[in-house]
Amino acid sequence: MKKQFSILLLAAALLSACNAPQFQTTKQSDVNRLTKSASFKMPKVDVPSFPNRTFNVLDYGADPTGVVLSTEAIQQAIDECTELGGGTVIIPEGIYTTQKETADGKNLYIFITSPVASVKVPAVLSGKCEVLETGQPIEMSVVEGETVINLPKNLFKDDSIVVLKCH
């Protein structure tokens, strides 16, 4: 039981250590204390350190209205963050659409960072739309050449980001 508790404490410390510096709460001394008090021998574990840099997707041309695809802008922010050795990619509140081609056609992904009642997509979608995480189907209708996606009120919980997959 003590071994499981020590492992859980260590896992919690390591998970919290994986945040960007402005959110980092775990100190190296805390991790050292946990690894030394484990009921089994553990190698030294270093708290990861991330550069205090931010990459805002808006600076790369992402559209927070969802009207224009933001696939390339978001990917550019991620790529530059990676090339420069890390940091935090910021996606401000809004609706961001991205597209990915798969073997069975194109999938449109819609990232919604704040509660809204509906989303308009400037294209006619003829397939289905669902919440990516749960597979919950989402109602769509076509109005004047645009697809309107109606979102249920209970879809947004806390500060979560909702991702829709439409195909």
Image (spheres, helix red, strand yellow):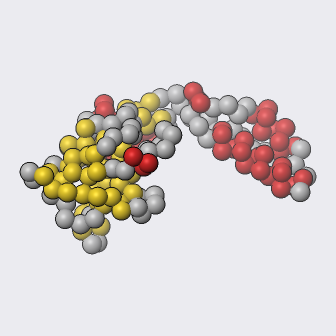
Query: Relative to 83, does residue 131 appear above or below in the rendering?
Result: below
Which residue appears farthest toward the front when viewing the image? 153
Query: Relative to 94, does residue 102 appear above or below in the rendering?
Result: below
Q: Residue 35 is drawn in which quadrant?
A: top right
| Residue depicted at x 33% and y 37% | 94
User: In this view of the protein, which residue sits in the foreground, 58 or 129?
Assistant: 129
Task: Residue 63 in the image: state x and y as whole percent.
Answer: 25, 38
The C terminus lies in quadrant: bottom left
| Residue depicted at x 30% and y 31% | 59
Q: Is residue 99 visible?
A: no
User: In this view of the protein, which residue sits in the foreground, 97 or 28?
Assistant: 97
| Residue depicted at x 72% and y 48% | 11
Which residue appears farthest toward the bottom when viewing the image? 104
The number of numbered discs placed on residues in the rendered structure image is: 0
Task: Residue 156 in the image: state x and y as whole percent.
Answer: 44, 45
Task: Residue 46 in the image: state x and y as whole percent.
Answer: 71, 40
The N terminus lies in quadrant: bottom right
User: In this view of the protein, which residue sits in the foreground, 116 or 162?
Assistant: 116
Q: Is residue 25 visible?
A: yes
| Residue depicted at x 37% and y 34% | 93
Which residue appears farthest toward the left when viewing the image? 144
Q: Is residue 133 left or right of residue 26?
A: left
